[in-house]
Image: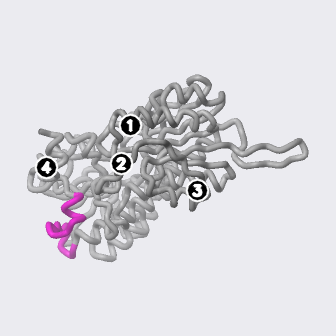
Amino acid sequence: MAYTIGVPKETAPEERMVALVPEVVARLVKAGATVQVEQGAGESAYYSDEEFSAAGATMVSREAALGSDIVVKVKPPSDQEIALMKQGGAYIGFMNPLDEPSISQKMAARGLTSLSMEMVPRISRAQKMDALSALSSIGGYRAVLLAAAQLPKFFPLLTTAAGTVRPANVLILGAGVAGLQAIATARRLGAKVSAYDIRDAVKEEVQSLGAGFVELEIEGQDSSDSGGYAKALVEEKAKQQTKLLVPFIGKSDVVISTALIPGRKAPILITEEAVKAMTTGSIIVDMAAQNGGNCELTSPGETVVLHGVTIIGKTNLTTDMSVHASQLYSRTLLAMLQDFTNEEGFAPNEEDEVFTGSCVTRNGEVVNERIKALLA
C-alpha cells in the first residue's frame, strides 16, 4: 500500500493558501504516493476539487487528511489538528517554533516527526526548499501595491499639459528578499526609491535595482549571523539608528519596513518622531507587524491613521496572492518530500544537514536545541 500525504484545508482566519497545488499533487502521485486532499481545501486559492481529482488526488474528509502518514500544511497546526494526526506520523510545514514553541511541544507529545519550513538552513542546496524567501518575495510585491493604492499621489513622474508631477519618494527599510522585491516593484511603478539596511554587503544589490542606498554614520560591526539573518543591533546603536533615519523617513511619501528576526520582537526603526516628520497623506506598510512591527505606532492586523500618516499593519500579505503563493510554497514542500521520502514513505536522514536543521520533533521529543532552550 502506498504511503499517504494529507492536505487539510487551512482554517486560520484569512488564510487562503493551500499546501499543495494540483501540479505538485500529480508529481507526487506519479512517484507512488497517495495524496489525500480534504474536500474544499483549494477553493480559496482557486483550485477546485475537480482539478485535484484530475491530478490523481483522493478527496477525503478532514479527519482522513489529517490522519495521513505525512501531513503538509501552511499555517502551524492547531491543538485540534495535532490531536487528529497519526500517532508517530510526520508533519512538514510552517510551525512558528521560535515564537510559539508550545506547538512543537504538543507535536512531540503526539510522537510526530516534524520538519519546520522556517528552520530550513539557508545553504545553497536548500534554496529550492526556502519557503520563507519564496513567500517574502510575494509580500514585498504586495506591500508596494498596497501603498500605491492608498497613496493620494502618483508613483511615477508624469508630464502633462497641466504641468509636471514629480515621482513619489519610496524608502525601503531592510534589503532582504522582501525588501529587494519591494524595491524592484516600486521602481517598475516609476517611484524614486531608496533603501536602508544595516548590512553594507547588500549595497550593490540595492543599487543594481536602481535604488539609492542610505548610509548612516553608525559604528561598524558585523550585522549578519551564520544563518544569513540580520542580527539585532545593540540598544545604544539601535537608538542612534532610529534617530538618524528620521530625516530620510520624513521626506518619504511611502515607507515599507521589512526587518524581521526569527524568534524576536521586530526592531523599532520608525519612531513616533519619524511618523510626525512625514507629510500628511504619507503611507507606511509595516511588513514586520506579525512580530510587533518596525514602527512603534503599528497596530498589528489593522490599518490606522496617526499624525496624518496611514500605517498598514497587515500580518499576512502573501495570502492576497493565494494562487501564486500556493504554487511557490507547494514547490518548496515538493523539494522536501522528494528528499525525505522513498517508495515506502517518510525517510528521515540524520546525516542530511537540511533534515537535522529543520527537524524540530522526533521520537517523542523536541530535538532542536534553540526550541528546547525556549521551553526550559
Q: Tag 1 or tag 4, which sits nearer the N-term?
A: 1
Amino acid type, mark 1: Lys
Determine crowd level at label 1: few under 14, some 14-19, many 20+ residues with C-alpha closer than 10 A.
Answer: some
What amino acid is found at the position of numbered circle 3 in the picture? Ala
Residue type of the residue flagged with mark 4: Val
Where is residue 306? Give x, y as percent. Answer: 56, 24
Residue 75, percent across and down? 34, 47
What segment carries the magenta color? 342-358
Residue, disc 3: 184
Which color mode does the image show? Answer: one colour
Q: Which mark is residue 366?
A: 4
Structural distance between the alpha carbons of marks 3 and 1: 29 Å
Label 3: few (<14), some or many (≥20) within 10 Å? many
Residue 98, located in which quarter of the rendered image?
top left
Q: Residue at x 28, y 60 (%)?
A: 121
Is any part of residue 68 visible from this angle? Answer: no
The residue located at (29%, 66%) in the rendering is: 336
Decide: is 225 above or below 232.
below
N-terminal of the pair, mark 3 or mark 2, is: 3
Q: Which mark sits nearer the N-terminus, 2 or 4? A: 2
Q: Which residue is mark 1?
A: 237
Q: Within the magenta stretch, is there residue 258?
A: no
Look at mark 2 in the image and give the residue it sits on: 221
Q: Secondary structure at mark 1?
A: helix
- Among all residues in the image, which is located at the extreme top? 307
- 3 or 1: tag closer to the N-terminus: 3
Label 2 vs label 4: CA separation?
Answer: 34 Å
Q: Secondary structure at mark 2?
A: loop
Nearest to the eye among marks 3 and 2: give it: 2
